[in-house]
Image (tube, grey):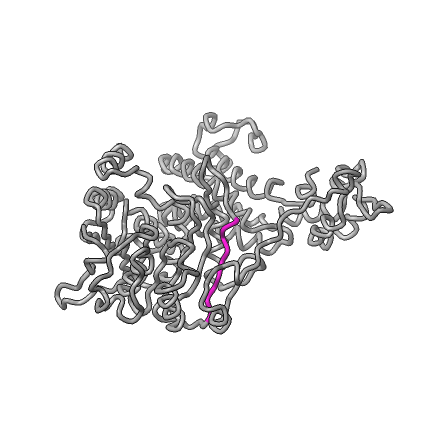
């Protein structure tokens, strides 16, 4: 019914329903950045000046809930020019259970009508966060706007592209200690003329915090490359953080989609202003100035080298030395394994020994490493019991997810070779199934969970892969199945990227 109503509103506006949406994973990336930045505030005001369906605002609320705050502490401001879409925004916010007194909306042209306003003082209303995904390179009429206080200190965006006009409007309504995230076409980073002058002024005022490159073909209705720009009016750092998140995605039908691991990695790198080779880099104002205030990401982050085919290897077989050397992190951990697995020919190429699988299965360092991985998560089972069972009435699902995810990332980070974001992705993929189980468990009040007394007289099904959810007949069994499922998912080999995966055994 909800999707039908959205379709009806979309049809009346002469647009496809999908065009009202910012893809959920992009909204989530922006929302996580905003929520972390505002985590210490009691009450929060959020504004979307091109609200579309209101999905960005709703995602912000969910991200703030992960920080342990009530969504009732958030005040939402939404502005939209298309009347049918404006009605969709209001309907969407109300249907998501947001208190009506916390919702303020305006059906007006964002660039021609300055809103929100503090009507008592007749001055612009400033908010804690602004999030927006405005129409890309929209033609607009800047005549008479030179004296508008939103643009006075920066200049006017060209008639051919209103991208910076939207950005400056957003920045104008931001509190001195607030945060702005905005999705814009990649061209805003390097185009000249009026846009270069605005970009230069923003950099001189130290208001650009980060530039995050997104994969192409990720938005509805356009395949162009886009970026998320993060801005603040007041910053301690004197550099700009560049993040190239354009290569981490999965293809879903005809579109590209950020995975949970890609979002988490980008957010954590932004939080810590971490530099990762080929992914992120802090760049000084002086270096940007020397580049003519050009913010094009490839100027500051070198693209990873393209795969090259070794023709000799294809003709005469054998593995090139470069491919073996690329696995050096594995050889460092499993000392002596390379010599056990490969023979080197006179021409310098390597060949895999016929009994490679047997060598891998019996190599003592690999056995010990697997044991270490399992042991590192021994305390995880009671931790899950605490978060998913004992505290199920005290904390929200969002908060439980964040607590468990942080524990997984923390444990995985201690282990060599383990990609902690791959571990997070595995957990994230199963979260819906876990929460569905938890809702089923919550309907069985008063039972002892993770207890053995309810299993007396029944065969031990703990290691039975054939056990399906339809066979769960008691609260104790269901809770055990849930915990065992999560423990198995985190500890089995799917989440253990050894050399055999890289070598395609």
Q: Is 168 located above or below residue 387 in the figure?
A: below
Residue 411: x and y, percent?
56, 53
Q: Could you tell whether 306 is left or right of 103 in the image? A: right
Residue 494: x and y, percent?
60, 40
Q: At x 43% / y 62%, what residue is drawn?
A: 210
Q: Nearer the viewer, residue 121 or 458?
A: 121
Q: Nearer the viewer, residue 392 or 500?
A: 500
Residue 245 highlighted magenta (yes or no): yes
Residue 488 highlighted magenta (yes or no): no
Q: At x 35% / y 63%, what residue is drawn?
A: 179
Q: Could you tell whether 168 is left or right of 422 in the image? A: left
Q: At x 49% / y 74%, what residue is drawn?
A: 286
Q: Could you tell whether 357 is left or right of 237 in the image? A: right
Q: Main secondary structure of the magenta part?
A: strand
Q: Nearer the viewer, residue 170 or 198?
A: 198
Residue 34: x and y, percent?
37, 58
Q: Which of the 4 image quadrants contains residue 460?
A: top right
Q: Is 42 located above or below residue 362 in the figure?
A: below
């Amino acid at each position: 019914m909800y999707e039908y109503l959205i379709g009806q509103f979309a049809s009346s506006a002469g647009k496809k329903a999908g065009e009202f949406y910012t893809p959920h994973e992009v909204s989530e990336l922006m929302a996580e950045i905003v929520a972390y930045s505002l985590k210490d505030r009691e009450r929060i005001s959020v504004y979307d000046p091109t609200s579309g369906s209101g999905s960005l605002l709703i995602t912000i609320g969910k991200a703030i809930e992960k920080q342990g705050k009530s969504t009732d502490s958030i005040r939402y401001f939404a502005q939209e020019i298309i009347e049918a879409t404006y009605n969709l925004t209001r309907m969407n916010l109300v249907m998501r259970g947001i208190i009506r007194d916390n919702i303020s909306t305006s059906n007006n042209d964002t660039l021609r009508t300055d809103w929100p306003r503090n009507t008592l003082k007749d001055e612009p209303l400033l908010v804690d966060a602004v999030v927006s995904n405005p129409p890309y390179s929209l033609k607009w009429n800047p005549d008479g706007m030179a004296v508008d206080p939103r643009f006075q200190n920066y200049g006017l965006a060209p008639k051919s592209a209103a991208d910076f006009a939207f950005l400056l409007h957003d920045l104008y309504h931001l509190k001195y200690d607030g945060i702005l995230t905005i999705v814009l076409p990649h061209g805003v980073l390097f185009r000249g003329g009026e846009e270069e002058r605005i970009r230069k002024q923003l950099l001189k005022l130290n208001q650009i915090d980060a530039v995050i490159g997104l994969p192409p073909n990720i938005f509805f209705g356009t395949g162009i490359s886009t970026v998320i720009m993060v801005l603040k009016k007041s910053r301690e750092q004197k550099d700009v953080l560049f993040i190239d998140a354009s290569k981490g995605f999965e293809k879903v039908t005809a579109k590209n989609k950020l995975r949970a691991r890609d979002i988490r990695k980008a957010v954590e790198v932004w939080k810590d202003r971490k530099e990762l080779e080929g992914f992120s880099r802090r760049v000084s104002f002086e270096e940007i100035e020397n580049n003519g205030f050009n913010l094009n990401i490839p100027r500051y982050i070198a693209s990873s080298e393209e795969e090259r085919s070794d023709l000799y290897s294809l003709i005469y077989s054998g593995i090139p030395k470069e491919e073996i050397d690329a696995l050096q992190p594995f050889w460092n951990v499993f000392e002596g394994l390379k010599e056990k697995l490969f023979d080197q020919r006179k021409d310098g190429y390597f060949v895999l020994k016929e009994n490679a699988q047997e060598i891998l299965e019996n190599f003592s360092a690999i056995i010990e490493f697997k044991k270490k991985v399992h042991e590192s998560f021994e305390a995880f089972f009671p931790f899950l019991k605490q978060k998913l069972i004992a505290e199920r009435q005290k904390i929200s699902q969002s908060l439980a997810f964040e607590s468990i995810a942080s524990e997984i990332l923390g444990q995985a980070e201690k282990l060599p070779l383990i990609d902690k974001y791959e571990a997070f992705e595995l957990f994230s993929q199963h979260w819906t199934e876990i929460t569905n189980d938890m809702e089923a468990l919550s309907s069985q009040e008063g039972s002892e969970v993770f207890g053995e007394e309810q299993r007396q007289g029944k065969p031990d099904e703990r290691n039975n892969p054939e056990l399906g959810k339809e066979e769960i007949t008691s609260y104790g069994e269901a809770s055990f199945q849930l915990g065992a499922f999560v423990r198995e998912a985190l500890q089995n080999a799917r989440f253990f990227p050894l050399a055999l995966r890289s070598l395609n055994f």
